Amino acid sequence: MSATSSASAASPKVVLVTGTSSGIGLAAAVAAAQAGWQVVATLRDPSRAGALRTAAAEAGVELDVRQLDVTDEASVATAISGVLADHGRLDAVINNAGAGHLGTLENESVDEVRTVMEVNFFGVLHVSKAALPHLRATGGRLITVTSVGGVVGQPFNEAYCAAKFAVEGYMESLAPVAAALGVSVSVVEPGAVATEFVNNIGLDIQAEVDAAGPYAKPLQAYLERTTAQFLNGAQTPAEAAEAVLEALTADRPAFRLQTSDWARAFTGTKLTDLDGSAVVGLTAGWVS
């Protein structure tokens, strides 16, 4: 074996993580680095990397922090080519970047729904498509953080859940095709996680209720229920990132991993609900 090939064999595996400014993406990037991976931690706005850099320093790990906007194909291409140029390989991708959204069809525009799909669905496809040739070369892994909202539709989350349903369906369909060429595909489904994700939606709750018209009463009920869940039952980002790390490091990772017992029970309601009555009966209680 040549000196060059020996060095390559000894070099750490390389994982690219999107959406690492906070929350699960930040925690997963740090956890992967602690597990010995070379982590390329990307975010749309590099000026928001302060918390990421602080967490890495506190954990005693180094991250390669780069800009990547998942909705911009040129930005994705630049990031992927930069990883290959500087590290020589790409062994895994963790699609984590996403944006929350609250609304219902009658009170929002179709363009708003398209925007949600661009970030949460097409953004995943941009990154995955650019990465796949390189993941084939390394027998790598394609991991996407979805949501329990990618399995169970939730009131006032129509657009968000539609995007996450689309991701789950796409990846479930892609998984056997990618596996035939040596690439493992997994989705990770968090429930409520104590992150900046909800805050980043930018909600003024009272203004939303005041503007909801005939939907004001069910929206108020939904917001009260959901706020209580996030205050009292949310996981930490580090806890949720454990499932991401399992998908990254397990010998044979499952296609679908939930991040908590609650998430397993909640998604299990849908996966065993052949006629839909259990799910609709459950979520109807959230808005009454």
Image (cartoon, rainbow, N blue to C red):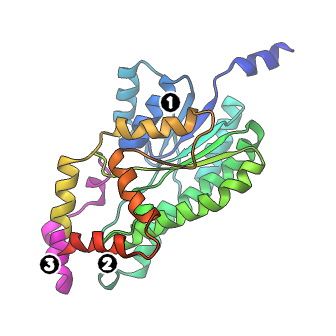
Vertical side of 128 occupied by 31: above or below:
above
Foreground of the two, 9 or 111? 9
Q: Pick whichever, 20 or 273, lies toward us.
A: 273
Q: Nearer the viewer, residue 268 or 160?
A: 268
Relative side of 193 to 168, left or right: left
Amino acid type, residue under disc 1 in the picture: Ala
Give residue 99's position: percent from left, percent from top: 39, 58
Q: Is residue 212 magenta-colored?
A: yes
Q: Earlier in the sequence, mark 1 or mark 3?
A: 1
Across and down, in percent, residue 25 comes to 43, 42
Quadrant where the N terminus is found in the figure? top right
Which residues fall within the magenta stretch? 196-221
Is label 2 or label 3 in front? 3
Who comes first in sequence, dot 2 or dot 3? 2
Crowding near the residue tagged with mark 2, few <14, some 14–19, many ≥20 C-alpha atoms within 10 Å: some
Residue marked by disc 2: 104
Q: Position of residue 170 (x, y in %)?
A: 60, 63
Give the CA distance from mark 1 to mark 3: 44 Å
Q: Quadrant of residue 282?
A: bottom left
Nearest the viewer among 250 and 103 is 250
| Real-space Cα separation, disc 1 to disc 2, in angstroms | 37 Å
* Secondary structure, magenta segment, majority class: helix
Q: Which mark is residue 32?
A: 1
The circle drawn on residue 217 is 3
Kind of element beneath mark 2? loop
Query: Amino acid under label 3?
Result: Lys
Residue occupying the far right of the picture: 1
In the displayed structure image, the side of residue 52 where residue 143 appears, left or right: right
In magenta stretch: residue 137: no
**Residue positioned 42% across, 65% down in the render:** 270
